[in-house]
Amino acid sequence: MCGIFGVVNDKAATETLLKGLSALEYRGYDSAGIATLTEGELDCRRAPGKLINLEQVIEALPLEGQTGIAHTRWATHGQPNEANAHPHLSLNVAVVHNGIIENADELREVLSASGVCFLSDTDTEVLPHLIANYLSAEVCPALAIQTALREVKGSFALGILIKGMEDQIIATRRGSPLVVGFNSESAFIASDMVAASGMADEILYLEEDDIAIVKAHDVVIYDAQGELVERKKVTVDHDQFVATKEGYDHYMLKEIHEQPNALQRTWNGFSSTSLNQIEEIDFANIDRLQIVACGTSFYAGLVAKYWFERMADLIVEVDLASEFRYREPPMPKKGGCLFISQSGETADTLAALRFAQSKHQYCLSVVNVPNSSIARESDYVYRTLCGPEIGVASTKAFTSQLAVLFGLVKKAAAERQAGKGILSELGKHSEGDVISRVRSALMNDEKRHAIERAARIFENATSAIFLGRGQCYPIALEGALKLKEISYIHAEGYAAGELKHGPIALIDEGMPVVVVAPYDRLFEKVVSNLQEVRARGAKVLLISDKLGCEMCKDYADQFIEMPTLHEVLAPFIYSIAVQLLAYYTAVQRGKDVDQPRNLAKSVTVE
Ligand code: G6P
């Protein structure tokens, strides 16, 4: 959600800034902009739309300077036009901002009364003017900025340039992520490690309300109380953060194909880490588990509910973070909470974690980005080891989350002495079985082409329905979400049994209905639901295994046959089918698969 980047003392700041922005573009692509200091003066270029537009502006009107800040925007306040693009400037201050200033209207009123003329509709524009009011010759600029920011409510990560101070960027954060990186020649600021890692050899994470004076060869940091502090630098593992398409047409397709390796790595590395001295959770000591997440991560949580309840005899509640955090549910003493987040920065999930901690809950998390806020603030962290996910629609992160959750379910089953029957049915090689089936589904050209052909079911569709039962109900929800996200077809996922309580009214002649149904103990029930929609004119695409497809050969219009796997493990394999289905649909419709409209990868605002 908005990416900020900055470089100090790079010979060609603009080139480096554009490179940093391109690594951050997945966070937002409504507009982009850069400000630099040239001979002490502020200069700026901005453009609406994707980064390429800014590149064209800069090509026509180059921007000099060795120190600069840059921004790629996901619009919150004000339309995605040039006036609202960052950086925002006062006479002597330029600011890039990720987050939301909640009291922007009040600040704007006060500043307007003192003669400030605003040029944009953004909340951010108050910041350069407010900061300018606090700068004076007597006080260190960083401390002056810190004082100014005490008037600000909301969340922010900021990169700030001050006229005349060519050797530095001032960086600060509250509630939004920000890292500072270094190599032998330059220093950087970035919203995430992926962007900085292409250039920096060492990185440090700023804490809440830290304010840093970032210079090419050193950094001075004041904490929230204005005391000088040091933050630990960590060495960047460049290989870990490589993010290229590697010959695939899109990041999403590459990431779909990375799933067998991602699952393997995640299971091989299944272990927890903790920054605190808290003893690891014993699932035998809790009566219920509260799972909290957003988006695709929420659906991973829903799959886990079925698993925990069936295999570990543990009651699980799954909540959307944005609801959970304000619902203020009563929390049992020594309760267990599990937060799932690819980015580890989703504002609502982070706030939910903080709420649970204030209620003395035992807080576990499943995250992909190491050292993210959720990872740092949890009692115990389990990592999905799938590498950076750049496509905005989550794919490999989802199945890797399932891998960690499956590992946790087995741990819980052992500690609670539950699920023996089902675990012995699954056998010792269940993880290996999953990986080999996922690999065979992806390697089989004929199968992939069958999915590509099946995607034509949506050719003239404006609306679609996904149905599933049991563990495949969340996969139906995820399939509908994937389709909406990248092809903009209105799609809804339903529990197949719920269909007749309303959604069936939507069915009319030719409407595509995707039925996600492995041949399992609920199969016959799903087939009845399939017939109900077909009788009303729907075009049915059945995703099942060999047996399921054979059983339904007269009832569905199209089929995607997936490898056979124990029903408990079906979510892994059926995820692949719905991901590819959405992918090919979006490609056939000519949509921007990796950067769908209005979305962003990491949602660091409410
Ligand atoms: C955004 C992304 C989704 C993601 C959700 C939760 O909406 O576009 O792909 O599932 O945020 O993100 P998280 O990083 O917390 O998993």
Image (cartoon, helix red, strand yellow):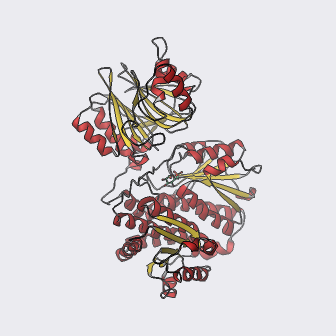
Total of numbered circles in the picture? Answer: 0
**Image quadrant occupied by the C terminus:** top right
Q: Is residue 233 visible?
A: no
Q: Position of residue 69 (x, y in %)?
A: 37, 32
* Lateral position of residue 267 relative to residue 32, left or right: right
Q: Nearer the viewer, residue 574 or 424?
A: 574
Q: Is residue 186 above or below residue 304?
A: above
For the question of whether residue 48 can be seen, the reply is: yes
Furthest residue to the right?
A: 333
Query: In this image, 450 relative to 172: left or right?
Result: left
Looking at the image, which is closer to me, 140 or 99?
Answer: 99
Q: Residue at x 53, y 32 (%)?
A: 104
Residue at coordinates 51% horizontally, 21% vertically from top-left?
Answer: 113
Residue 504 percent location from the top left of the image: 57, 74
Q: Residue furthest top?
A: 138
In the rendered image, residue 402, in percent from the top left (x then y), is placed at 55, 62
Check the image and report above or below for 570 versus 92: below
Q: Tell me where residue 42 appears, x and y as whole percent.
A: 34, 24
347 or 221, which is in the foreground? 347
